[in-house]
């Protein structure tokens, strides 16, 4: 299962039933779990931690040092969960002293050419489109769908269950359950198709829609709009998530 043309550092820890193709490079201080497929020319570098049942395609680089001039060689990691598909030429840098690790959760699809910068946290169940570039210390919550060639500014927060249109760029937070698109990027309605596919009830979808109608369409400032949401929309974990996300936003939300 391991090609004789692959290089594996003797200190690397490799789990069971791992297939490693020719010209793969696996550095020291690397831990790889069980049932992984690592295709030719992939590079698994110092500090990488890879779970189980992942597929890593040719040219992917996991654990390269951050593209951050403040990095001074500190001990950090790039941590990949289980059941991820990491396509060709994806780059996932390890963390810096800021957070110590870059994390990609479980059951994600990172398409060709995606870049995940230092200290970023990608949740689970996400799809990240071709050539999307994620800057440092970005947070992407679970079940987000990001189309191709999207540019994310550092420190942004992307909510769960969003759909982001291809070619967008943004430097503010994108709250959960919405579609974000156009140029410049703006709120473009709720992700109703995605929510239905995920089993959200019609009543809950309507409550989410009413929440964003208050936030975006009544002309109030965000603080007053959130107060109105609390007074008028039935509370549920999903509505509380929206309110908490916006209240905690440090960069402000897209408008």
Image (cartoon, rainbow, N blue to C red):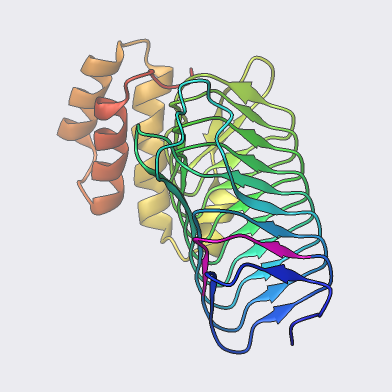
Q: Residue at x 55, y 66 (%)?
A: 107
Does the magenta-highlighted stretch encompass residue 89? no
User: Is 186 placed above or below 192 here?
Assistant: above
Q: Residue 54: where, in percent of width, then height? A: 61, 72
Q: Is residue 126 left or right of residue 177?
A: right
Q: Residue at x 63, y 77 (%)?
A: 36
**Region rendered in magenta:** 24-32
Tell me which residue sits at (42%, 50%) in the image.
205
Depth check: give the residue in front, 173 or 52.
52
Q: Residue lying at the far front in this picture: please name it.
A: 10
- Depth check: give the residue in front, 227 or 90: 90
Residue 40, compared with residue 143, is above or below; it is below
Is the N terminus in the top left, top right, bottom left or bottom right quadrant?
Answer: bottom right
Count numbered badges in the picture.
Answer: 0
Verify whether residue 26 appears in magenta. Answer: yes
x and y percentages locating residue 97 in the rendered image: 36, 34
Q: Nearer the viewer, residue 54 or 229?
A: 54
Q: Is residue 125 above or below residue 161?
A: below
Q: Position of residue 120 (x, y in %)?
A: 47, 40
For the point 37% across and 16% down, which residue is it?
A: 218
Q: Position of residue 206 (x, y in %)?
A: 40, 46
């Amino acid at each position: 299962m391991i090609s004789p043309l692959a290089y594996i550092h003797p200190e690397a820890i490799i789990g069971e039933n791992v297939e490693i193709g020719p010209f793969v490079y696996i550095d020291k201080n690397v831990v790889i779990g069980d049932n992984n497929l690592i295709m030719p020319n992939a590079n698994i570098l110092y500090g990488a931690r890879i779970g189980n049942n992942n597929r890593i395609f040719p040219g992917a680089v996991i654990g390269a040092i951050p593209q951050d001039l403040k990095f001074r060689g500190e001990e950090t990691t790039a941590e990949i969960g289980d059941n991820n598909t990491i396509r060709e030429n994806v780059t996932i840098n390890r963390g810096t002293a800021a957070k110590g690790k870059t994390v990609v959760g479980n059951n994600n699809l990172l398409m060709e050419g995606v870049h995940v910068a230092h200290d970023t946290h990608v949740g689970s169940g996400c799809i990240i489109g071709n050539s999307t570039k994620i800057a440092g210390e970005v947070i992407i919550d679970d079940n987000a769908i990001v189309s191709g060639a999207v540019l994310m500014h550092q420190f942004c927060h992307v909510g769960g269950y969003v759909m982001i249109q291809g070619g967008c760029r943004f430097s503010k937070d994108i709250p959960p359950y919405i579609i974000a698109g156009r140029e410049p990027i703006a709120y473009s309605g709720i992700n109703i198709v995605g929510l239905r596919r995920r089993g959200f009830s019609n009543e809950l979808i309507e409550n989410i829609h009413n929440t964003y109608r208050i936030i975006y369409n009544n002309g109030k400032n965000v603080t007053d709009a959130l107060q109105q949401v609390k007074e008028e929309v039935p509370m549920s974990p999903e509505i509380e998530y929206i309110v908490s996300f916006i209240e905690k936003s440090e960069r402000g939300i897209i408008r």
